[in-house]
Image (cartoon, coloured by chain):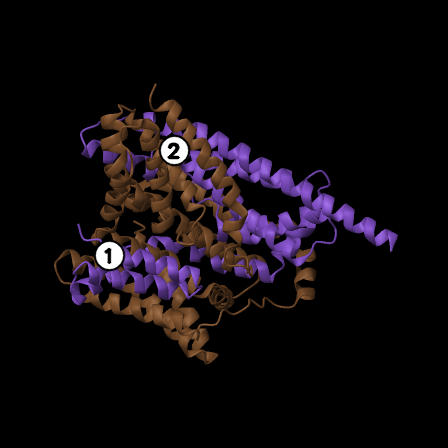
Chain colours: A purple, B brown
Amino acid sequence: MNYWPLLGVAIVVAGFAWRLNPALVVVAAGIVSGLLAGLSPPDLLALLGRSFVSNRTLLVIVLTLPTIGLLERAGLREHAHAWILGLRRLTFARLLVAYLGLRQIVSMFGLITIAGHAQTVRPLLAPMAEAAAEKIAPELSDPERERIKALAAATDNVGLFFGEDVFIAFGGVLLIQAFFAQHGIELDPRSISIWALPTALAAFVIHALRIAWFQRRIGKRDAASSEKDGRS
Amino acid sequence: MIRIEYVYWLCATLFAAASGFDLIARRFASAAFWAILAASFIGGDAIEAAASAGNALPAQIAGLGVIALALIAGSGLLRRQPSHDGDAQRRRASAQGLGNRLFAPALAIPLVTLALVLLLPYLKAPHIPLFDPKQATLAVLGVACVIATLAAMALTRAAPLSALRESSRLLDALSWAALLPMLLAALGAVFAATGVGDAVAQLVSAAIPTQSREACVVAYALGMALFTIIMGNAFAAFPVITAGIGLPLLVGQHQGHAAVIGALGMLCGYCGTLLTPMAANFNIVPVALLELRDPNAVIRAQWPTALVLFAVNLMLLEWLAFR
C-alpha cells in the first residue's frame, strides 16, 4: 500500500486552515497526489482535464443567473422584504420551518433542482427571512443579518440532504444498491430508502428546534437592548 | 431532442458574455478566466468523446486549462466584484410598480421544472424522447431557466443584452467560488485514481478492535463522516469506507442488515457534508451568493444540526442494523 498520496489530503487541510485560495489549494493537492502515486505528468493532466469537464453538471445552476439578475435589478429582493413585512402572522421560525419541511417533502419525490441557493435562497428565502426577523427585532445588527442569511442557506442544505435519500430513484440509493450487488448482496431500493426516514424526521425536528431557538435569542436580545435604550 | 450538451452550450454563452464584459472593462484576468471556462464547456463533449476513443490530447489541454484557472484564481487578480445592482431608490420604486408580478419569473424556475418533470413520461415525439433521457431533469432545468429568463425580460422590458450583463455581474460576484464544485469533483477523481481512499480505509480498519461490535459501528460511522469531510462528497466516501469497514466487519463479522447499514452509513456521510468547505456547492457557493463576509458562515450555521444528527444516526445504526 502506497501511503504517499495521502499528502494530497494534508495539503487540502493545511490550505483551508491557512485560508489560501481554495481553487489553487485543490488543484495543487490533486497534482501532488497524482505525482506521488506515480502517475506520469501527461496522464495526470488528462485525468485532471477529463474529470473536470465530466463534472460540468455542477455548474448548470448558472443558467438561473440572468433571471435572478434582471429581477433583482427590478427590485425583487425589496419586494420580497416588503411582502413578508405585510404578513403579520408569518414569523421568522414559521417561515424557515415551513421551507425546511417543504424542501424535504419535495426532495423525497426526487424534485431536487426545484430549489437551491441560486434559485430560491438568494432571491427569495434570504430577504424574506431577514424581513421576518425584523418583525421581532427591528434593529438587526450586521452580524445578525449575516447569521440569518447563513441560517437560510443551511436550512436549504438540511432540507435537501435529508429528503433526497428517501427517494428510491435517487443516485445515492442506487449507488448503495449497486455497491452491495457488486458484492453479492441483492437489495430492493425501497428496502434501502425506507431506513432513511427516521433520520429525515430527526433532521426536521433538530433543525426546526434550532430555528425556533435562534428566533427566541434575537427576540430576547432586542428586548434587552431596547430596555437599555429606554433607561439611558 | 433536447440534448444535455445544448444546456452546457447555453452555460458557455453566459461565461463568454462575462468574458466579453470583463474585457471591455479591462479586467483581463477575469476575462481570461471566463474564456477558459467557456471553452471547456463548448469542447466538453468532444473532450470526453476523444478520451473514450483513446486520444488523450484534448483532455490534456483541458488539464492545462484547469491549472491555468487555478493559477488565475490564486493570483488574487480575480478580485470578487461586489454586485452593484442599480441604485436602491430606483429598485424600491420599481418593486412598488411591479408588485407581486416580480415573483412570477422567479417562481417559474421551480414550477416549470416541476411541471416538465411530471409531464416527462408523456413528452415525446414518435420514437424520440423530447429530453435527453440520460439527464432529463437537468435538461428540464435548462429549459425552465430559459423560459424564466424570457418571462423576466418581458416583465422588466429588458433586452437580451441586459440579461447577459446581469448574469455577468453575478458571475463576477461569485468569481472562483463558482468553479470550486467542479475542481473538487476533479480532485475526488484524482484521489480515487491514486488510491487515497484505500489507504484511509486501511488505516482506519487497522486501528479498531474488530471483536467489539460497538467499536465497529463507531468506526464505520466516523469513517463515513470524516472521509466525506475530506472528499466533500458522501458518494465518494461510501464505496471506500463500506468496502473497508462496513462490509467485512458490520455485515460479515457482526451479521448486520446490509440495507440499514448502507442507508445510515450514507446519512452519516451527509452529516460530514454539512461540516466541510470541500462540499463547495453547498457550503461555499452560498457564501458567495449571499455576499457573506465569513467564508465559513454556512458551516457555522449548520454544525450543531450535523453533530446532533450524527449522534442520532449512530444510535439508529446500533438499534436497527442488528435486530
Dot 2: what SS?
Answer: loop
Chain assignment, label 2:
A
Does B4 sit left or right of B77 as displayed? Answer: left
Mark carried by residue A5: 1
Mark carried by residue A216: none
**Residue B295 in the image: x percent, y percent?**
50, 59
**Residue A9 in the image: x percent, y percent?**
32, 56
Mark 2 nearby-residue class (10 Å; few <14, some 14–19, many ≥20)? many
**Residue A161 in the image: x percent, y percent?**
43, 40
**Residue B55 in the image: x percent, y percent?**
13, 62
Q: Residue reaching furthest left?
A: B54
Q: Which residue is drawn at 30% across and 66% down?
A: B66
Q: Which amino acid does label 1 sit on?
A: Pro
Dot 1: what SS?
Answer: helix
Residue A198 visible in rendering: yes
Mark closer to the observer (1, 2): 1
Q: Which of B162 and B47 is in front in this view?
A: B47
- Mark toward the start of the polypeptide (1 vs 2): 1
Q: Which of B12 and A102 is in front in this view?
A: A102
Please determine if labels 1 and 2 lie on a single subunit.
yes
Residue linked to disc 2: A167
Q: Which residue is drawn at 52% across and 42% down?
A: B304
Residue A168 visible in rendering: no
Label 1, label 2: how far apart the Cα atoms are:
36 Å
